[in-house]
Structure formats: structure tokens, C-alpha cells
Image (tube, helix red, strand yellow):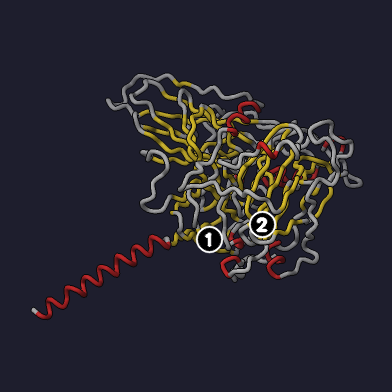
Amino acid sequence: MGVVSSAVPVRTLLLTATILLALAEISAGATRHYKFDITLRNATRLCKTKSIVTVNGEFPGPKIVAREGDRVVVKVVNHVENNITIHWHGVRQLRSGWADGPEYITQCAIQTGRSYVYNFSTAGQRGTFWWHAHASWLRATVYGALIILPKPGVPYPFPKPYKEVPIIFGEWFNADPEAVIAQALQTGAGPNVSDAYTINGLPGRLYNCSGKDTFKLKVKPGKTYLLRLINAALNDELFFSIANHTVTVVETDANYVKPFDADTILITPGQTTNVLLHAKPTFPNATFLFAARPYATGQGTFDNTTTAGVLEYRNPIGSGSTKLPLLRPALPSLNDTAYATNFASKLRSLADARYPANVPRTVDRRFYFTVGLGADPCPANQTCQGPNGTKFAASINNVSFAFPSTALLQAHYLGRSHGVYTTDFPNNPPYPFNYTGTAPNNTFVSHGTKVVVLPFNTSVEVVMQDTSTLGAENHPMHLHGHNFYVVGTGFGNYDPMNDPPKFNLADPVEKNTVGVPAGGWLAIRFLADNPGAWLMHCHIDVHLSWGLRMAWLVNDGALPTQKLPPPPSDIPRC
């Protein structure tokens, strides 16, 4: 009996230890391992077959799923001739800036036959993110969803959906996108536009030869579905709508928002939006198209086509043989800025006890950035096809950002900035003019690898001002390494005296990508609490290619937890 009785507490101790280990694992998070093989594969769309760059032969690429607090480890092996990097869009990369991914900013590219392991935490974040190539225009086909679920036992702040479905919008080129941008940069002209938009890689039945290449979403009557919308298109903002259905917006850029109903969603390149689709309570005796087409504000040409998928209801009494009517959505007009502005104005943070809006109330550094197009002179002995025989360019505060020959973060970390970058990025436009009025005759931009250096924990306010130079246009601006709060916006020129009193500091939406309105301005605030080198750029890729980008260097803080660790041993070198 003595032996048996002494074994009971041992079992209890073992069980207790097991439970404690399980609880520790839950609190610390799991480690999720993935392998990305960058390979070529043939893909056929619009009755044309071509070779595309993919991850693991998939288009779109594989979905990554993790929980808040997990660690994600992705080994990327490059088997193609193109140099490549991968960016984890929206992931803060707190003290893991080496894993952020933009070429020449946090790393040099992964060359053919080489590999790199991206290793980062999802602490403090949950929602719909995505990943994509961040070198040249490779993200045309190299992209996928990154879903971070809440911690175990933590519910959504909205009714639990029956099912969750990623909906990724893309842009298909019959030509090689790398050749498209190379030709545009050579001639100075705008690039040839895409041939189709896609939903989860499929153009949809409204295009020639694409009836079978149509994404279908099958739903049950009375159920609620969470649609995780991602705009991975290269160069176009999109309106999205489902025929005869209203959706409830509950999240944008992986931040919960006060729910509101909408017939149409506006989503810019780089943005994500979660919506609840409430299926009709009974079988509706119809099928429904859901469609996306551009919101276009610039003067250049664009792909004026529409991608569509089909929403089908499961018939509880069998399939039947009756052909059901197909209903189509009514989308806003292509230049409906009024709808775009109204939609954006409804996005507000939850700003409650669990999900507060920690917008900086005081500001240490203020910046006024013009964002827009410009030009470069045509080189000697060359004919250029840009405006008035010039070459298209783009800039922030008239500085068209030139990528360095080595990674900014490496130079910053080693304290070797000489010959790599300078710290004289202008706080304000160097040549003031009536930004939304008549454009100046001189549209030429300057070039340089100029950055802004910020002490750790600096509170920053940036007013981004669109300009009419070569045409006013909506610019979706993306900030790496930080979220920001959209505290104000308006049309015309920003008024530093009369506009700040109208700022929303109570429940502004928290984002990582936001559209600066065509012919207007937008104010953001963020806390520079993440040491590293962080790109800020327009997510319309042709504008990024033309130089509409800049970088923030955030210095280390005083504490060990406020310092950037050394680079991984396998980080690619230039």
C-alpha cells in the first residue's frame, strides 16, 4: 500500500507540471515553421500561358496562419534568376527589423541559389495581414495571406463567424511584369497596364476565355461569413461589392473598427479589410456576382476592367435543375471620390478598454510632406516618352528616393552611413507653392538617399499633402514597422492654423496603409517605438518605382528591450 500511495502525488505532480507547461506554451506562443521555395511555373489566364514566379508553385502563394504571440519562422530559398525578398505586410517587426524584407532597406536581396530565414513574433497583433515580394514588380505573382488569430480563448469583438474566407485581389499581366516596368523606366513613359484583375488568382467570367477561371464562394442560408479582403493589386485601388448584399466592416489593416454596414468597400493596394457577410435567411433562388473594379483618380491610363466571383447558396432541398438568375452588383463610378471619402470617414477605432486608441496626444516632431508625381530630364541622345519629352518620376518633398548600394539597416546598425545615406531629408517642402492649384512649370525632382533620424519613443505627426503636379492623385501610403492613427484629412491645401483643432484624437482609425486623397491632405500620428530602418512609400508600385518613398531611422532606446539585436548570420549581403 505504501508504494501505491506514494505514487499518487507523483502522478499529480506530473499532471500539474504538464498543465503548467501547456499554459506556458499558450502564453509564450507556438513557433510556426514554413518553407518558401521561390520557383517558376506555367500559368494560363485569359487563354494565354506564361511562366510566373511563385512560392511553392502556388498562385496565389500559401496561406500562413498563426496566433497572436506566436513566432513565425519562414525559410525562403530562391530557385529563380530574379533576386527577391519577402515583406510581411503589417507585421510590426518589433526588434526584428532584419525580417521586414524591403530590398536595400532592411536587407539585400536573396540571390539565385541562396536562402534566408525570416524570424519574427506576432506579439500584440491579430487580424488579416499578407506577405509579398518587395523587389521590383515581383509581387505581381508572389503574394499570399497571413492570418494572425486571437490568442486561445480570446473572442472576436463581433459575432463569431461560421466560416472565414480570404479574398485576395490581384492584377494579371499577359506580359512579364518585370519587362513592363523595365521598359517604362527606360522610356520614361507610364507602364503598360494590366490585362485583368483577379480574385484569389482567377480573373472571373466577365473576361474572355475565363468562365472556368472564376472563384466561387458557396454559403449556407442564415450563416455569417468573415471575408478577409486583401488588395494585392500592383497599381490600382478597387471598389468591391456583392450583388444584393450588405456587409459589415469590422477590421481594417488588422485593427478592429467600430462596425458599420456598407454596400461597397474601397480598398487600396496594401490594405486589408475584414467584413461580415450575413447570408440571407432562406434560399434566395438566385446566384450573385461579387465584383471589383478600379477607383481611378490620376490622369494616366489604367486597367478599366472588372473581376468577378460568384456567390452561390447551398439549396437545402437539393440542387434542382432550374437555372437560377445571376444578379450583378452596382459599383460606384471609376472616379467617385465622394463615395471614397465617405467610406474612409466611417473608419473609427473601437477605442474601448480592451482595444484602446493610443494616439499620441502630444507631438515631439512635426513634418509636412508633399507626395506626388514629377519628372526627370531626358538623358542626352535619348528620346523620352514622359510628359513633354521628359521621364516620369515621383517624390516626397521633391526628393525622389534612391536606393543605396547596401542595406540601410546594416549601415545604420554598424554606424557606417558615409556614402550610403544622409540625414538631411527635408521636414517641409523645399519649394512652397499652391500645392493643389496650378502646378509650377518646373516639375523636376531631386534625387538622394535621404532619411529622417528619430530618437526612440519620439511622437511623430506627419501631414501628407497631395499635389497637382502632373495631376492630382490618391496615394496609398504605407509605413513599415509601425501602425499610425489617421487624425485628420481634408481637400485643398492643409491649413496649419485651422485644421489641427478639428483633428480626431478620440477614436481615429489605426492603420498601416492609407490613401492621401486626390487634391487633398491627410494627417497621421505614430510613436517611433521600434528601433530600425523603416520604409514609407506609396503602395502603387509604379509610383514606388519612380521614387515615391523615404525612410525613417529609429535609434535604440536606453533599455536592452529597446535595442535592435544584431543581424542574423544568414542575412543576404550586397
- SS for callout 2: strand
Residue matched to label 1? 120
- SS for callout 1: strand
Q: Amino acid at mark 2?
A: Thr
Q: Which mark is residue 458?
A: 2
Residue 364 locus on image (x, y percent): 70, 54
Q: Estimate how packed mark 2 is, as few (under 14), some (14 to 19) or many (20 or more) residues with alpha carbons within 10 Å.
A: some
For the point 72% across and 66% down, the residue is 411
Residue 53 locus on image (x, y percent): 59, 50
Q: CA distance from mark 2 to mark 1?
A: 24 Å
Callout 2 touching callout 1 (CB < 8 Å): no
Quarter of the image containing the C terminus? bottom right
Classify 58 as above or below 163. Answer: below
Q: Amino acid at mark 1?
A: Phe
Number of numbered discs present? 2
Seen as rendered, the residue at the extreme bottom is 2
Quarter of the image containing the N terminus? bottom left
Position of 439 compared to 25: left or right? Answer: right
Residue 109 locus on image (x, y percent): 65, 60
Residue 298 seen in this snapshot: no
For the point 47% across and 58% down, the residue is 34
For the point 77% across and 45% down, the residue is 395
Classify 480 as above or below 258. Answer: below
